[in-house]
Amino acid sequence: PRWQAIRAACAGGARFRYEATVCAGLPVVQTLRDLLDTGDELFAVHGMFSGTLAWLCNRHDGRQPFSALVREAHALGYTEPDPRDDLSGLDVARKLVILAREAGWPLSLAEVDLESLVPPALAALPLDDFMQRLDALDAPMAAKLAEARAEGGVLRHVAQLDRHGRASVRLQVLPASHAFAHTRLTDNIVQFSTRRYCDNPLIVQGPGAGPEVTAAGVFTDLLRIAESLEARA
């Protein structure tokens, strides 16, 4: 597999950087690398990895139809070109796989338990047709919001992964006291449970969508590669 070839190349001195593939400009991949390189052991990862879905959950308060929020997020550039990549949870599942493989766990995309927000009838439509039929999302999402409010909680799109190979991506109702309940706008939040950070997990949090923060993540990778090349010269 390609990811194993990349790991082998890195062991041989090659430089691969892909920080912005997970949570845009947040130092998520680097934090995981630093933990593992200093001898820590990863037990589990929990997080909100989609700035798009974070923004949608934060804005979804019943005053606007969910479909209107999706259209607004698309216009702002928060979504993938096809919003179904976000709404299906597939984009988040890919990020979970990246972190699993960074930890040396051989997780595949097919092994992620994925709960999509896209109705099956809309999943295979051409993009323009899907955008015209976004209203089909309104009733299911209104019902989920009502469920969350009845429980005194909030809706959050959560991904989780553990060292036993269990991985899932789904919309959840979380209690208002949960750390993930206090995110704002496009905030991503990633919680690492490790041997060192067991009772009080290590958290990385911040904006996870938008061209500026994503570009900053790519630029940081370029700077790190340049620094490593200078050190080897």
Image (tube, rainbow, N blue to C red):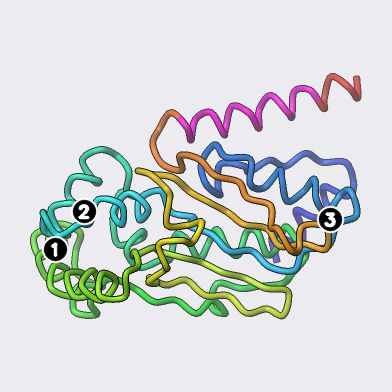
Residue nearest the observer in this picture, 19 or 10: 19
Residue nearest the observer in this picture, 213 or 12: 213
Q: Position of residue 143 (x, y in %)?
A: 19, 75
Residue nearest the observer in this picture, 81 or 214: 214
Whether residues under marks 2 and 1 lie with C-beta atoms below 8 angstroms apart, the answer is yes
Q: Position of residue 205 (x, y in %)?
A: 54, 44
Secondary structure character of the magenta stretch overall: helix
Q: Looking at the picture, which amino acid does disc 3 mark?
A: Ala
Bounds of the magenta segment? 213-227
Residue identified by numbered label 1: 134
Q: In the image, is residue 168 above or below residue 201?
A: below
Q: Is residue 186 left or right of residue 45?
A: left
Residue nearest the observer in this picture, 45 or 20: 45
- Magenta stretch contains residue 214: yes
CA distance for labels 3 and 1:
44 Å
Q: Is residue 115 left or right of residue 107?
A: left
Q: Is residue 82 left or right of residue 143?
A: right
- Magenta stretch contains residue 216: yes
Determine the secondary structure under disc 1.
helix
Quarter that holds the N terminus: bottom right
Residue identified by numbered label 3: 8
Determine the secondary structure under disc 2.
helix
Q: Looking at the picture, which amino acid does disc 2 mark?
A: Val
Residue identified by numbered label 2: 70
